[in-house]
Amino acid sequence: MLKQNHRAWIEVDLAAIKHNVYQLKSLLVGSTELMAIVKADAYGHGALDVSQIAIAAGANWLGVATIPEGIQLRNAGITAPIVVLGATNGNDEIKAIAEYRLQPTICNSKQALIYHEVLDHIGERVSAHLKIDTGMSRLGVNWQEAIAFVKLVQHLPNLEIKSVYSHFATADDSDRTFMQLQAHRFEEVIAALKAEGINPPYIHICNTAAMLCDRQIHYDIVRTGLGLYGLYPAPNLKNIVDLKPALTVKARITQVKEIKAGTSVSYGRSFIAPQDMTIATVAIGYADGIPRGLSNLIRVSVNNQKVAQIGTITMDQCAIDVTNVANINVGDVVTFLGGDSENTADDWANLLGTISWEILCGFKHRLPRINVFQQVGLKVF
């Protein structure tokens, strides 16, 4: 198999992605559509393949953060609507939006006017998604100014309003007070628009966490990121739907050696052998996405046994304790995350005081992504 040529790699189970789309769609109310968020290379899973399987499984939209992410998908033949969730303002950015049939997020009146001027000059028209800030304080016009903003855009002939949307700041929090405040503000905006006779084709506010905890606010689209990849945004949102993690991280042993009691391992001598030991060097490190902060804290799997990672994780390598593993050899596969390691991104995030999103997005591009469907020879598309 292809993976035998690699020192370290990521396996992406496209069957799990497909399963997760089915599961998430089963929660949707009425004609609500699903937007698969595939920014940041699909949270490290591979944007093109994830996009293809998500669409095949029933996703209606794709969400990216940047124009190059959208162009990559268009150049690969993706024809589904692609929304650029980040802000874009420059002339060349606007021209690229039009050329590649991407749908921009418009965050304020100044940006809308710039878009209109550039599009008018090149004779193009694009579908746009208007962002309302209901409390995230990141992108979007303040909710109190939303009506005037939408009215302005409505009178710009080179911009077609495709949706009005917002984003929750605390949907993954068990205390839903602020989420409910944001939802109320958004509902006020939508009601005021309708009172003015303005009915956007789509309205949306839900991310994965919000769609799991409140079906009443699914509206026309839900945007699912973390759930697509098989993880739950918070412990209190588990068991609502059956999600399967799709990513497994593996690497090969490059050396096996015996060390004596008292011998130190790796930089800084953070591990001192308490007894004579057999250790193995594995060809993966923090430059690949294994956080250095996990040094001496995690257990990994090799030859169906759980063993400790020991010593400081270095840029390209780390060490494991294989004293009690029989028949250990150079070339043996070590599973760090997912699979039979039983480690999850949540586990690592908890150890580091961060979030699973950061763990998944941290795996670098020098780790090849190998799709399980391709390995077993199944035809998906």
Image (tube, rainbow, N blue to C red):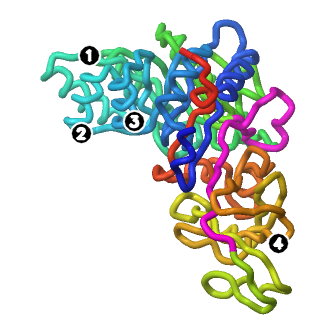
Which amino acid type corresponds to the residue marked 4 in the rendered image?
Answer: Thr
Identify residue for label 4: 323
Q: Which of marks 1 and 2 is nearer the N terminus?
A: 2
Which amino acid type corresponds to the residue marked 3 in the rendered image?
Answer: Glu
* Crowd band around label 1 with a 10 angstrom C-alpha radius: few (<14), some (14–19), many (20+): some
* In-front residue for pair 331/234: 331
Q: Within the image, what quadrant is residue 168 found in?
A: top right
Q: Is mark 2 on a helix, strand or loop?
A: loop
Which amino acid type corresponds to the residue marked 1 in the rendered image?
Answer: Arg
The region drawn magenta spans 230-256
Q: Earlier in the sequence, mark 1 or mark 4?
A: 1
Q: Distance between the residues labelled 4 and 3?
A: 45 Å
Q: Within the image, what quadrant is residue 34 found in?
A: top right
Query: Looking at the image, do the residues carrying marks 4 and 3 touch, with CB atoms under 8 Å apart?
Result: no
Q: Which of marks 4 and 2 is nearer the N terminus?
A: 2
Query: Looking at the image, do the residues carrying marks 1 and 2 touch, with CB atoms under 8 Å apart?
Result: no
Identify residue for label 2: 90
Q: Which of marks 4 and 3 is nearer the N terminus?
A: 3
The verdict on residue 73 being magenta is: no
Residue in view at x 83 percent, y 63 percent: 326
Identify residue for label 3: 69
